[in-house]
């Protein structure tokens, strides 16, 4: 017996015991505190006390690790977590992860894993179709940040093919890209990481709906052109992280065409609407984009670390990322299939598609539509109840994201209310400024959130307000 294998009986006992713990958690997630006491030093001690002692038996080890996970973390799987797009993972995706970790497919070369490769290829094509692309290439990746970085690299390669050989040194003008100040910060980080620098990121003025103002965008590009800059990319957001707004996707596509810019839609959260037969109208114009980010680990409820990048240019990824390496397997070259490592930032990569594929097999596309609708219904319910209870809604999003405050609430008062809610451990909400005005923010990120939790939050908020004196 190899040491790391344990023996068969031990494995069965471990899985059996873990499975009981996990089942009790999944069934009774609501019995947990939504958030932990925040004392990192106590947690450090929890670890060092246990890890430096002589080896423990398997139950103690499992209790220690699961105790860390369920008692020393915000429980994003809790139905009263009204947070930042972190979902409760759909159960089939969890099982997919267990199977994946066991056989450990290496996704770098397709010939090592024809099955997981073809599953991801299938899902990318299906997602692209739902976005309205006529042809789709794409890749699974770690999340929206990697997908956005991929987009910036594809855009650079598209506008300045010499970039692949010479880097930015080979470009005589300063390349610039356009987005709004509500755009996710991963775009600025991507600009930094590929050497463009943060000043290359232009923030376009927004209208009062916090969407990019297309006239201001047009004018900004013209000014940049006459000042010797080289505009190369336009980023729209479908579902901004704060207020959940969707930029004017169609009109922005027209601007991108007018100036020959790579048009990327960051739909990390709301790209999911493409799976809803009616709500996909909210994404109208996305089909004209050059690329799209959509996270499967947000609205589509896969375990964390599951993003996708889609592009309507079939050559773009391989042209941007292909590098040949003698040690890579060269089997199966007679087939029309490109190795993932020639297609993405990552090299060795775990299989990610199965997390969605398993859920798809259990629930079908109709299951995704139904779930998305449920989130939207819960969001509408919450908006109505908040207004009944005297709160003002400060954003105007079609998504289940609500930014709200009392008419005369100061920032301090809102911070106090937010802290009261979080410290109660009965729910989790956050704060976000809308046009400089601080608000409370609650998002239905969890498919298991029902009317009960929505009503409980509104009651808790009343309690928080009354606790004032
Ligand atoms: C969450 C988010 C990102 C970043 O995605 P990660 O999966 O966290 O890397 C990018 N853009 C938007 C709009 C997001 O909501």
Image: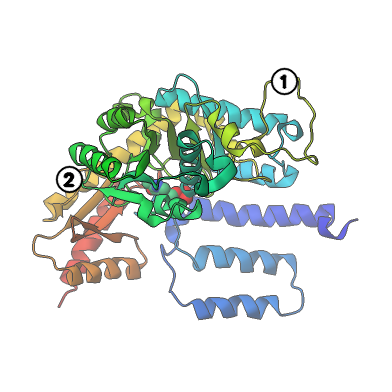
Q: Position of residue 441 (x, y in %)?
A: 27, 56
Q: CA distance from mark 1 to mark 2?
A: 55 Å
Which residue is pictured at 35% across the width and 50% down the height?
201
Cβ–Cβ under 8 Å for marks 1 and 2: no
Residue 295's label in the rendered image is none
Residue sitting nearer the eye, 253 or 350? 253
> Percent from the top left, x then y, of residue 375?
33, 40
The residue under label 2 is 384
**Residue that numbered label 1 is attached to:** 335
Q: Nearer the viewer, residue 100 or 61?
A: 100
Identify which residue is drawn at 64% across, 79% down.
Answer: 48
Horizontally, is 56 left or right of 438 in the view?
right
Disc 2: CA contacts within 10 A as few (<14), some (14-19) or many (>=20): few
> Could you say which quadrant of the image residue 336 lies in?
top right
Residue at 25%, 39% in the rendered image:
222
Residue at the far left: name it: 408
The mark lying in front, picked from 1 and 2, is 1
Q: Secondary structure at mark 2?
A: helix
Above/below status of 61 relative to 192: below
- Residue 235 point in image, percent of width and height: 35, 40
Label 1 element class:
loop
Q: Is residue 416 above or below residue 165?
A: below
The residue lying toward the viewer, choosing from 298 and 380, is 298
Residue 358 seen anywhere in this rendered image of the structure? no
Q: Is residue 64 visible?
A: yes
Expressed as whole percent of the image width and height from the top left, the position of residue 153 reads 50, 42
Number of numbered tags placed on the structure image: 2
Above/below status of 2 relative to 343? below
**Nearer-N-terminus badge (1/2):** 1
Instruction: Report the colour scheme.
Output: rainbow
């Amino acid at each position: 017996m190899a040491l790391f294998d344990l023996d068969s009986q031990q494995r069965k006992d471990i899985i059996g015991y873990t499975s009981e713990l996990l089942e009790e958690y999944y069934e009774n997630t609501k019995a947990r505190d939504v958030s932990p006491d925040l004392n990192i030093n106590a947690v450090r001690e929890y670890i060092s006390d246990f890890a430096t002692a002589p080896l423990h038996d398997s139950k103690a080890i499992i209790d220690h690790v699961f105790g860390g996970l369920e008692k020393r973390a915000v429980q994003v799987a809790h139905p009263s977590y009204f947070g930042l797009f972190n979902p409760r993972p759909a159960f089939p995706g969890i099982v997919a992860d267990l199977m994946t970790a066991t056989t450990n497919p290496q996704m770098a070369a397709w010939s090592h894993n024809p099955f997981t490769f073809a599953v991801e290829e299938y899902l990318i094509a299906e997602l692209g179709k739902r976005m309205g692309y006529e042809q789709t290439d794409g890749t699974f990746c770690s999340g929206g940040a990697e997908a956005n970085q991929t987009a910036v690299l594809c855009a650079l390669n598209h506008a300045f093919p010499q970039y692949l050989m010479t880097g930015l040194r080979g470009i005589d003008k300063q390349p610039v890209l356009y987005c709004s100040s509500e755009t996710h910060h991963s775009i600025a980080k991507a600009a930094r990481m590929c050497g463009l620098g943060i000043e290359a990121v232009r923030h376009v003025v927004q209208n009062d709906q916090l969407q990019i103002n297309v006239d201001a965008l047009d004018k900004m590009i013209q000014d940049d052109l006459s000042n010797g800059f080289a505009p190369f990319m336009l980023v729209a957001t479908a579902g901004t992280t704060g207020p959940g707004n969707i930029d004017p996707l169609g009109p922005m596509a027209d601007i991108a065409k007018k100036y020959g810019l790579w048009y990327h839609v960051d739909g990390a959260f709301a790209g999911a609407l493409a799976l809803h037969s009616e709500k996909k109208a909210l994404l109208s114009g996305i089909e004209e984009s050059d690329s799209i980010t959509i996270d499967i680990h947000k609205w589509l409820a896969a375990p964390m670390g599951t993003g996708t990048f889609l592009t309507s240019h079939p050559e773009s990824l391989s042209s941007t990322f292909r590098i040949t390496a003698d040690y890579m397997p060269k089997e199966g070259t007679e087939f029309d299939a490109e190795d993932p490592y020639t297609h993405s930032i990552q090299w060795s990569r775990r299989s990610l598609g199965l997390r969605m594929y398993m859920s798809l097999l259990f629930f079908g596309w109709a299951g995704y539509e139904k779930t998305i609708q449920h989130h939207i219904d819960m969001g509408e319910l919450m908006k109505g109840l908040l207004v009944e209870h005297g709160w003002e809604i400060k954003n105007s999003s079609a998504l289940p994201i609500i930014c709200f405050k009392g008419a005369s609430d100061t920032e301090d008062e809102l911070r106090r209310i937010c802290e009261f809610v979080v410290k109660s451990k009965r729910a989790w909400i956050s704060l976000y400024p809308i046009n400089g005005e601080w608000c409370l923010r609650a998002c239905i990120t969890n498919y298991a959130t029902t009317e009960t939790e929505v009503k409980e939050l509104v009651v808790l908020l009343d309690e928080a307000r009354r606790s004032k004196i």
